[in-house]
Image (cartoon, grey):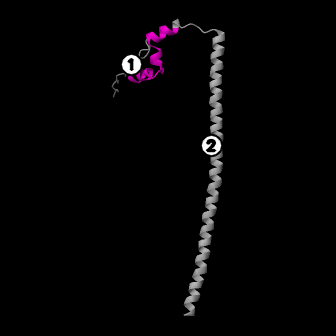
Amino acid sequence: MANPRRPKLRIALPKLDSPPAPTKVDLEIARNHGSSMAIEATPERLQASKNMPTPSLTEIIVDLNRRNGRLTRQLLYADRMRELGTDLLEESTFILERLRMAVINFKQGQKDIENEFGMLDSIATQDT
């Protein structure tokens, strides 16, 4: 008995001749001054990038120094915030431990007082 031939499934691959068309999300990103592959591949953006002048070495150095300064400030900010958070954690841990000890001492004192007054009550009932 011969097996019937199954038809071959043909998968249509997307055409890679042209860039993807911008979607609604891409348009929203563009409205918020963002960028995506679909936005950068629009004919207007491609033409603008071709016409953009190449910055001089001095301009590149100035731009990199500006970026470096910004990153240095961000790093300093993050370090100081981390330091502040570490201090808060240490202080909170110390206070929490003192609070735990205060509760333990209170409960122990409460038991001692209850035992003392319990003994007094039992003595008083024996006297009558």
Q: In this rendering, is residue 11 above or below 100?
A: above
Percent x, y of residue 2: 34, 26
> Mark 1 or mark 2, which has the lower sequence index?
1
Q: Is residue 65 above or below residue 98?
A: above
Q: Horizontal placement of 43 versus 77: left or right?
A: left
Name above or below for residue 84 compared with residue 113: above
**Residue drawn 43% across and 21% down?**
31
Quarter of the image with the N terminus in it: top left
Q: Please state the extent of the stretch shown in magenta in the rendering.
A: 22-49
- Residue count near mark 2 (Cα–Cα under 10 Å), binned few <14, some 14–19, many ≥20: few
Position of 26 with respect to 89 (left or right) is left
Vertical position of residue 123 compared to residue 40: above or below: below
Mark number, residue 12? 1
Q: Quadrant of the C terminus?
A: bottom right
Tell whether position 14 is magenta.
Answer: no
Q: Amino acid at mark 2?
A: Gly
- Which residue is at the front of the view, 20 or 106? 106
Which residue is under mark 2?
A: 85
What label sits on residue 62 in the rendered view? none
